[in-house]
Amino acid sequence: MKLFDENPEKRIPTNYGALTTLITVFFFWGFVAAGNGIFIPFCKTHFQLNQFQSQLIDTAYYGAYFYGSLFLYFISQFRGIDLLNRIGYKKGIIWGLIISLLGAVLLAFISTHTGARFGWVLAAFFVVALGFSLQQTAAQPFALALGDPSTGAHRLNLAGGVNSFGTLLGPLIVSIVLFGSLKGTGKEPSLGNIKLLWLILGALFALVALFFAVSKKLPKGTNEEHIEKSPKATVALILIAIPAAILLFANNLFSDSVRPYMVMGMLAITLLILFISMEMAKRDKTGWGAMQFPQLVLGMVAIFVYVGVEVTIQSNMGALLKTEAFGNMDEKYISSFISLYWGSLMIGRWTGAITVFNLEKKTRQLLTIIVPVVAFGIILLVNILRGNEVSNLYLYIFCILVLIAGIFYGQEKPAKTLLTLGILGAIAMLVGIFTKGMVATYAFMSGGLFCSVMWPCIFALAVAGLGKYTSEGSAFLIMMILGGAIIPPAQGALADTRIGIHDSYYLAVACFLYLAWHAWQTRKVLKRQGLDYDTQIGGGH
C-alpha cells in the first residue's frame, strides 16, 4: 500500500497517543446519537408521548449542533476573528467535553427522580449535544494537526470508522442498560436504569478533558487569521433559527391537530429561506460571504436533507416495528435492528474510506467488495454475542451487494455517486412502503447503506471553488446538521395523522429524490463555473 508521500522519512510523525485519545470523542458522538434510537421509543412509552413528541429528542440533540455553531459564528462575526481559531482547537475540545459532562450529570440527576418531566430530559440532551457541537467543530481540524498534512485524511477516516463503531454499539449498550441483559430479558425498563450509563459517560468526558488539559505535547491549534463579515448571511441564519427555536421551545403552543401542519410549515420555511438567499446572492454577492456561491447554498440544503433522512429513518423505526404489520415487536428486541441500521452506515463508510489510500485500481476494486462483507461479518458477530438469532439477517447481504454495485457505478465521482445512491435510497424506501414484515424492514434499514457515503459527496461538491471562503462555507455546512432536528419530528407529526407511521416514510422518499436532484443540479452549476465536479471522494463524516 502506498500513501501520498513517496518519502515517509520526511513526514511529520503522527502523535498517536493524542490521536488515540482524540478519537474517543468520535466514538461518543456515534454512541449517543445511535443510542437515541432505543431511548426514543422507551421515552414514548414512559412519558406517554405521541410520535411527534418522541422525536423532540432528535430536535434537542441535533438542534444543539446548529445553535452551538451559530453562537460561535455570531461571536466570530462580531469580533472579526474566528473564536475557535483564537482559543485553539485543544481548548475547544476541552470546553466541549466539560459542557457534555454537565449534560450527562444533569441527565443522571433527572433519572433519580420518579416525577421527572420529559422537558428536563430534552434539556439534558441539548446540553450534551451542545458540547458535542464544539467538540466536532474543533476535533476534525485538530486531527489534521496531529501529524503530517499529507496523511491527515487517513486520521480523519480512522476517527470516522471509530464513530461508526460507536453507532453500532450504542443501541445495544443502551438496550442492556434499560433492560438488564444482552437478550433484553432482565428487568423492567425505567429512567433510573440509565443513571449508571450517563455517570460512566460523564466520567469518561472528564478523563479525556483532563488528559487534554495536562498534556504538554499536544498542539494548541491556534490561528489569528481575520474573517470577512457576512451580514446578509447572518440575517438568513437568524431567520432559519426562528422556526427551529419554536419547534424546540414552544411546540406546546400548538394542538395535536395543528402540529403536523406547523412542523411541515417550518420545514418548508427553512428550505425556502435558503433558496431565496441563493437567488438574492446571484443578483448581488456583497455581504453574503460563502453563501454567494450557489453550490454552497445547495450543499447546505443537501446536508440538511441528508442528516434529516439519515436520522429520521431510524428514529421512527422503533414505532414502525411495534406495529402489527411488522410483528408487534417489543421494545427490548428493537435494538438489534437499530444496530443493523447504524451498522449499515459503518459498512458504507469503511468502504468509502478505501479511496483515501493510493492503491492500485484492481486492489481498490477488490477491497470495495471485501471490506463491506467483513464489516457485515462484524455486525453479525456483535448480534451473536448479544444472543440474537442471525440467520434471518443473512439475506441482508443482497442489500450490501446493491450498495457495492452503486459505488462501482459511481466511479468515485461525487456527483455521480450521490445521484446513484439517492435513486437507490428512494427505491428502497418505496419497497419498504409497499411491503411488510422482514422485506420492508430490510428495505428501510438499507437506507443506512445508501446514506453512508453521501456526506463526503455533498461536502466535496459544496466547497468546490470557494477559495478563501472554504472555512466559512464548511461552518455553514456543519450548521445544517439542523436537518436532524426538524425532519424526524416532521415525519413523527405525519405519523400521528391518518397517514400512519408506515406511510410517513414517503417523507424519506422525498428526501432521497431531492438528494438525487441535488447531484444533477450542482453538477450543472459547477460545470458553468468551469470547476471540477469529478474529484475523488473519501469516507463519511
Image (cartoon, helix red, strand yellow):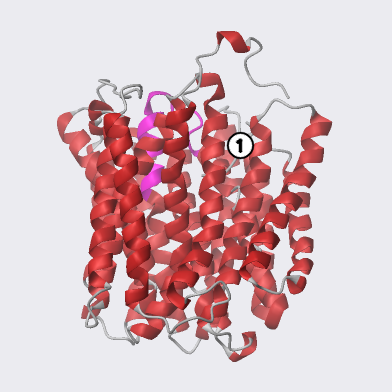
Q: Nearer the viewer, residue 287 or 457?
A: 457
User: Residue 181: x, y in percent?
Assistant: 52, 74
At x 61% / y 52%, what residue is drawn? Answer: 346
Left/right of residue 289 with respect to residue 83 in the rendered view: right
Q: Is residue 475 magenta?
A: yes
Furthest-left residue in view? 78
Q: Is residue 223 magenta?
A: no
User: Residue 249: x, y in percent?
Assistant: 22, 68
Q: Nearer the viewer, residue 113 or 412?
A: 113
Structural crowding at the residue carrying mark 1, measured as other residues with C-alpha within 10 Å and reported as few (<14), some (14–19) or many (≥20): many
Check disc 1 and give the amino acid type: Gly
SS category of the residue bearing label 1: loop
At x 62% / y 15%, what residue is drawn? Answer: 5
> Which quadrant of the view contains residue 75?
top left
Say whether residue 247 is visible.
no
Q: In what quadrant of the picture does the N terminus appear?
A: top right
At x 47% / y 77%, what residue is drawn? Answer: 179
Q: Nearer the viewer, residue 204 or 227?
A: 204
Say whether residue 87 is visible.
yes
At x 78% / y 68%, what residue is drawn? Answer: 395
Q: Which residues are magenta?
A: 462-479
Image: 50 above or below 460: below
User: Residue 528: x, y in percent?
Assistant: 56, 33
> Which quadrant of the view contains residue 447?
bottom right
Label 1 sits on residue: 538
Image: 378 above or below 255: above
Left/right of residue 360 with respect to residue 18 in the rendered view: right
User: Residue 6: x, y in percent?
Assistant: 66, 12
Left/right of residue 308 with respect to residue 391 in the rendered view: left
Predominant SS along the magenta part: helix
